[in-house]
Image (spheres, grey):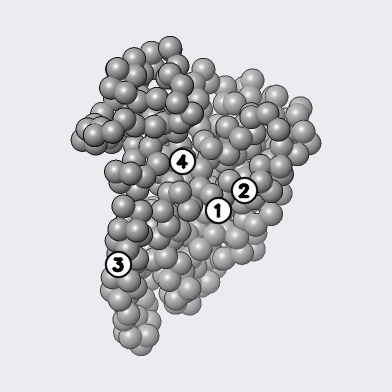
Amino acid sequence: MKTVSTLVLMFVSVCWLLATNVPAKETEEDFAVWLEGFREEASSSGISQETLAAAPADMEGPLPSVVKLDRTQPELTQSLDDYVTARVSEKRIDSGRRMMSSYPTWLSRVERKYGVQRRFIVALWGIETNYGEYSGSFPVIQSLGTLAHDGRRSDYFRKELLEALHILDKGLIPAKSMTGSWAGAMGQCQFMPSSFRRYAVDADGDDLIDIWNSVPDVLASAANYLASIGWKPDQTWGRPVSLPEKFDSSLAGLQTSLPLSRWQSLGVRCSNGSDLPLRDLGASLIIPDGPGGPAYLVYDNFRVLLAWNRSNAFAVAVGTLADRFAAQK
């Protein structure tokens, strides 16, 4: 089943790449028309002419590398098992434990204020940018302009581009500092512009929200995001499980939530064969790679992680890394 899933992912990726094979001249002309329309929308949304004169000037045209990266995201091209294995490495686990030892005071403050367990905050930090080692060097405005012009998720990225311009217009970030991932995610916690405006906080009290360089701001901003969208401090994210033979796979999916006791009666067990916890939380079963692939029972906090990144593989990787921090060495 894993081989079939991989082949399907490869086929989808190839189809997307072929769909974007548009002649360069046609793309440039189309982009110029699109940019003019966008300038009008941005102006009507209240963005100053000064900002409009400076920022969109950076959008000289689409960045082909951004479109290519959009079509070959690892969440789309890797199996869940491969994705998690690549990101939850012993090196990343050890580095995360060092980070938890290096920032105990700030992690304690953030944990108390927002009610998010530190291991999840650090795990997100590790999965997103390897603890700030690489937060991206793409120009955010140009990247977002490329994706807003592109057809796959243009409405979403158009809104994010407007948010980015509002950030510049309010002077929250110097234009030269607004760098990030190919998709416009910024800083060590990889906030999209809309997330920055809603959830980023100045934790160190220097009157500057700096998720690029200030670790306290990074940790607090990530925790504020999770807390604001429903994180439950008394729960974990989920757990890997084993399924009995001839299990009814129609029960899998986030649309189905059953008490742990019900999953227990259906023959579902922890991955080591032990019984499920006695606490009767509602849980959903996911089998991201299809029948025969890794299976997980996930709780409400898993859905919160999906709000951060809509990939099951991403959310499982964050949860798995957080669990490894807590495990005995």
What amino acid type is highlighted by mark number 4? Ala
Q: Are marks 2 and 3 in contact (CB under 8 Å)?
A: no
Q: Are marks 3 and 1 in contact (CB under 8 Å)?
A: no
Which residue is depicted at the point 24% across and 34% down?
A: 246
* Res 190 visible: no
Relative height, residue 157 to residue 103 (above, below): below
Relative height, residue 83 to residue 62 (above, below): above
Image location of residue 305, percent across then percent down: 46, 37
Residue 86, numbered label: 1
Query: Circle 4 sits in a helix, a strand or a loop, which is it?
Result: helix
Q: Residues within 10 Å of mark 2 (few under 14, many from 20)?
A: few
Image location of residue 177, percent across then percent down: 65, 59
Residue 238 as seen in the image, left or right of residue 26 = right
Residue 315, numbered label: 4
What amino acid type is highlighted by mark number 1? Ala
Point out the tag, 4 or 1, that comes first from the N-terminus.
Answer: 1
Residue 11, numbered label: 3
* Res 183 visible: yes
Task: Report which residue position mark 2 lands on.
Answer: 89
Which residue is depicted at the point 36% across and 76% down?
A: 31
**Cα distance in 3D space between marks 4 and 3:** 24 Å
Which residue is depicted at the point 38% across and 57% down?
A: 76
Query: Circle 2 sits in a helix, a strand or a loop, which is it?
Result: loop
Residue 207 as seen in the image, left or right of residue 266 = right
Point out the tag, 2 or 3, that comes first from the N-terminus.
Answer: 3
